Image (cartoon, rainbow, N blue to C red):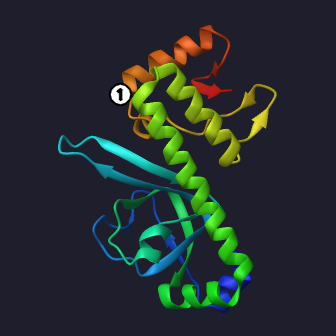
Amino acid sequence: MIAIELLEKYGAVQKNFTKTAVIFKEGKLPAYYFQILSGEVKMNNYNDDGREFIQGIFYKNQSFGEPPLFLNQNYPASAVVVEDAEILCVPKESFMKLLNENPAISIKIIENLAQRLYYKSVMAAEISTHEPEHRVLRLIDYAIANFNFKKDSNGYLINFTRQQIGDLSGLRVETVIRAIKSLEKKGELKIINRKVYR
């Protein structure tokens, strides 16, 4: 999202994280801006029953965890590595200086945060009012538009596990599996070698 050279100019340090590593924990104060060079990161919470809820999944060239950074509030979720990741970390003060000295970057950040807020609003409405099939399809369509999923002769490969779809949509895995099978019968999705395509 922000050019690597510019981030490095403001003190970015590259850190490597292995799968399942925790980048930051829920309840901690933010100290860095994070941008992914490679890999995959999720932000998640657990309810009192131990059920995971994924707040978001982030990929190469995306940033995560900015709202608490701007608000100086504790993180409302933890950031956990899903696939080994290389991440640029910019100290908070340096990042704020970068934004002050580069207004065009500030606009990019605002647009990015607005997109995420829009997604949360859409998904909140979906979770509270729609049937599982509709929720799964809406999540998949949003992911295709925003996560650069690859397209081949079968369609767009949905790079989410059934568990992740459930955690992102508030559904149980069993419900997600039934919804995907039903959507396949209706011709909305394809299942090829256990992979889902749209």
Residue positioned most to the left: 48
Amino acid type of the residue that numbered disc 1 sits on in the rendered structure:
Arg
Q: Position of residue 41 (x, y in %)?
A: 50, 57
In the rendered image of this protein, does residue 27 appear above or below residue 114?
below
User: Secondary structure beneath disc 1?
Assistant: loop
Please name whichever residue, 160 or 53, is drawn nearer the observer in this view of the structure: 53
Q: Residue 141 vs residue 75: left or right? A: right
At 68% across and 26% down in the image, what residue appears?
A: 198
- Furthest residue in direction top, as rendered: 185
Identity of the residue drawn at 57% across and 62% down: 113
* Point 43% across, 50% down: residue: 55
Q: Residue 30 in the image: x percent, y percent?
A: 39, 77
Residue 52 in percent (x, y) is at: 32, 44
Q: Is residue 123 left or right of residue 76?
A: right
Query: To which residue does mark 1 refer?
Result: 172
Q: Is residue 62 visible?
A: no
